[in-house]
Image (spheres, grey):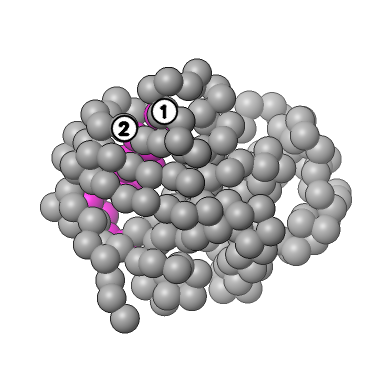
């Protein structure tokens, strides 16, 4: 489904990794270990060596917009270009998903400026899910959320992964969360990925 072959990005790598359809891999590591850098390289936002494949197609052989539509990065603090939340949802919004994230349809009329950091984080995730990516790269997707909101995000992502058979690469600082959501867990240290067993 999705694989890295000898990927190198600055002080990270070379890394090789296979992520199956429907699998969630969590990457843990200290601040500065390169977790976000890894995700940015995979999404083709930062220079890198080696190759990344999605469904047998190489990143280097695909136009960047096509790659980023299939292999989508959701950053810890996402960008907003318009004043109103709803203007960012060009593919519409799933009202049931909004509700599951603890939000209401009224959120579509909110200004970005009135949203809390946690609301923006949930809405940015929902914006990405509405594009139906096959691979999700998640950089601390619950980093600004309380426990209840975090569990809501975890549940929705688990359902999306299961029903869409999406591959998920999830960067987290929370070992307990990683144990809950991941099919496999790795630690990124000294540029290398080491699998956590047990």
State how far apart marks 1 and 2 are (Cα).
7 Å
Is residue 33 inside the magenta stretch? yes
- Give above or below for 196 relative to 66: below
The quarter holding residue 99 reads bottom right
Residue 127, position as x, y percentages in the image = 67, 42
Q: Earlier in the sequence, mark 1 or mark 2?
A: 2
Q: Is residue 89 left or right of residue 139?
A: right
In this picture, which residue range is highlighted in magenta? 28-44
The residue located at (28%, 71%) in the rendering is 196
Is residue 27 inside the magenta stretch? no
- Give above or below for 151 relative to 1: below
Contact, mark 1 vs mark 2 (Cβ under 8 Å): yes
Number of the label disc, if any, that sits on residue 183: none
Q: Quadrant of the C terminus?
A: bottom left
The residue located at (55%, 58%) in the rendering is 22
For this orientation, the residue located farthest to the bottom is 198
- Give above or below for 24 relative to 10: below
Q: Is residue 197 left or right of residue 192?
A: right
- Badge 1: residue crowd in 10 Å (few <14, some 14–19, many ≥20): some
Judging from the image, what secondary structure is the residue with disc 1 in?
A: helix
Foreground pick, 83 / 179: 179
Residue 118, position as x, y percentages in the image = 60, 55
Residue receiving disc 1: 59
Q: Is residue 176 visible?
A: yes
Residue receiving disc 2: 51
């Amino acid at each position: 489904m999705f694989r890295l072959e000898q990927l190198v990005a600055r002080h990270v790598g070379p890394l090789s990794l296979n992520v199956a359809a429907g699998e969630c891999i969590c990457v843990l590591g200290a601040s500065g270990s390169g977790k976000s850098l890894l995700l940015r390289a995979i999404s083709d936002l930062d220079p890198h060596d080696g190759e990344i494949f999605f469904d047998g197609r190489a990143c280097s052989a695909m136009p960047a917009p096509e790659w980023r539509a299939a292999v989508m990065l959701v950053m810890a603090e996402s960008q907003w270009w318009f004043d109103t939340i709803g203007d960012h949802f060009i593919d519409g919004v799933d009202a049931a998903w909004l509700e599951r994230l603890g939000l209401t349809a009224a959120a579509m009329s909110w200004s970005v400026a009135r949203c809390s950091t946690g609301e923006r984080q949930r809405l940015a995730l929902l914006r990405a899910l509405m594009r139906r990516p096959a691979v999700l790269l998640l950089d601390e997707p619950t980093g600004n959320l309380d426990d209840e909101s975090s569990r809501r995000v975890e549940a929705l992502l688990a359902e999306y992964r299961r029903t869409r058979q999406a591959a998920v690469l999830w960067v987290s600082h929370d070992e307990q969360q990683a144990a809950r959501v991941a099919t496999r867990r790795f630690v990124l240290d000294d540029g290398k990925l080491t699998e956590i067993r047990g």
